[in-house]
Amino acid sequence: MTDNQLKLWNAIKRFELDEPEVSLNFTDRLARENGWTIEYSLRAIVEYKKFIFLLTISNHPLTPSDQVDQVWHLHLLYTQSYWEDLCENVLKRKIHHGPTKGGDNEKDKFTDWYEKTKALYLETFKAVAPKDIWPTSEIRFSEIEFQRVNVKRNWIIKKLFI
């Protein structure tokens, strides 16, 4: 990393998503909405910050893992935190979220961008992205059948694959 990149990375690492003294903070909400532990949610937030940093240094589009995308989606709901505190004040630029338009061409495009993201991650952070947050492209783009479910009214039974 260059000196400027290191300075930016340190600012992103220090960026706080959790508001003090609220009953349901960002991490709690992330865990609740995704069925994750607090520990896993905290790890996903670190990976989100790494992804945001990679977006700022990359010369090509990137794609997050689904877990990182869930953090991003939630952060976008905290509009002041995302647009003003992070983009304006820390990054000094806007980072827009562009979802797929569907179809095979889009799948190929996002798969390519995902592979480029993981390669840039390795190059930048000198470590392989954790597989439980950054799975293979095959898993990333095949396990996409999600629905919001009220777990107070519905049971969720995990399918067993043979």
Image: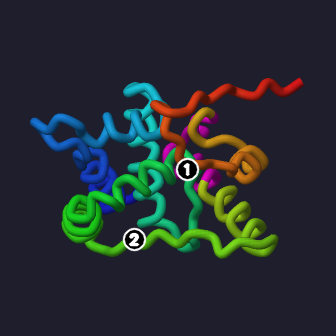
Query: Image point 28% across, 49% down: which residue?
Result: 10
**What is the CA distance from the residue labelled 2 to the residue labelled 1?**
18 Å
Horizontal arrangement in the rendering, residue 103 relative to residue 118 (left or right): right
Look at the picture and state if 100 lies above or below 14: below
Task: For mark 1, give the secondary structure.
Answer: helix
The amino acid on which the numbered mark 1 sits, given as a three-letter code, is: Tyr
**What is the x, y in percent for residue 80?**
21, 64
For the magenta stretch, what is the residue range? 118-131
Query: Image point 33% across, 59% down: which residue?
Result: 77
Task: For mark 2, give the secondary structure.
Answer: loop
Residue, far left: 21
Residue, far right: 162
Residue pointed to by mark 1: 121
**What is the x, y in percent for residue 54?**
47, 59
Rendered image: mark on residue 95: 2
Query: Image point 67% across, 26% down: which residue?
Result: 157
The amino acid on which the numbered mark 2 sits, given as a three-letter code, is: Ile
**What is the x, y in percent for residue 97?**
47, 69
